[in-house]
Amino acid sequence: MKTFVCIDDTDNLETRGTGELASIMIEKIEEKGWGRCTYITRHQLYFHPDIPYTSHNSAMCFVIDHDNEIFEDSKNFAVNFLETETAQGSDPGLCIAEYDKIKDKEIIMNYGRKAKKEILNKDIAYKTARELGIHLSEHGGTGGGVIGALAGVGLRLTGNDGRIKGKMKFPIPGNTLTVKQILENSDIDKVQSIEGQVLGESENIRLGEKVKAVFLDYSKVLLVYSATDEETGATSWNTCIKEQLKKY
């Protein structure tokens, strides 16, 4: 069984970010033996002057893989965690969705897509959650984080949105690795160009200062781009920089 958990708007500029709180939640859930949690995906939502956010207006989502019924326990834990750990002045929201019990997945996915380009409100979020049988709750401030929390689950369900939280590090030396080395020394599923070409194992990849993966095709993907050296004319594959990853 799979249960989706997403939190949004839990911090202020001086405190731990929402991603860090999601990481702590994962540690505690696994310590309790409720299941194994996936990596966290960061979902970028709409930037607009009328939308309050701390720094980037993004929601953090992860999935619990479990065998037993954990909904009530995980909900009670998450509610208590947010009410005790979120920052003063934040507007935290929580969404918990049991995959098999979501009544219409297309509706929540469309809601998530809208949240990337439109201003939504709490009434819309709560109405959508009620229709779909999804837990949605606010835990301080205006509670505006429920808008993004629901959107984060919808976007994670699409399988094609979000950056994976954290920088990637490889346990072998060198600034250039083959695709095979990357796949064997990480949990990356594939290395792919920004144009959509899946690279073969023998291709060399030049690693940038901050190597980050994205969530595409329900997979953890390392995106790369081709660059040409002005002096030698040689081309090489390079991991994407921050500006290139902003649209994910």
Image (spheres, rainbow, N blue to C red):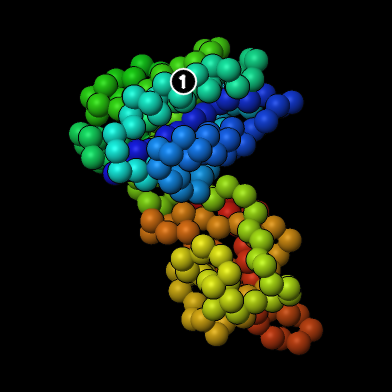
User: Which residue matches tag 1?
Assistant: 79
Left or right position of 149 against 49: left
**Residue that sits furthest to the top in the current view:** 141
Look at the picture and state if 27 lies above or below 194: above
Residue 45 appears anywhere in the view: no
Residue type for callout 1:
Val
Q: Where is residue 179 in the image (x, y as percent from the top left)?
A: 56, 76
Residue displayed at 54% across by 50% down: 164
Q: In which quarter of the image is the N terminus?
A: top left
Q: How crowded is mark 1: few (under 14 residues within 10 Å), some or many (20 or more)?
A: some
Residue 188 image offset from top left, x and y in percent: 51, 64
Specify the farthest residue to the left: 103
Observer-nearest of 85 and 49:
85
| Number of callouts | 1
Q: In which quarter of the image is residue 169?
A: bottom right
* Residue 106 placement (x, y as % from top left): 25, 41
Residue at the location (34% across, 24% down)?
72
Element type where label 1 sits in the image: helix
Q: Where is residue 213 in the image (x, y as percent from the top left)?
A: 55, 57
In the image, residue 34 sits, relative to residue 48, either above or below, namely below
Horizontal placement of 247 versus 6: left or right?
right
- For image coordinates 41% across by 21% down, the residue present is 76
At x 73% / y 80%, what residue is drawn?
A: 229
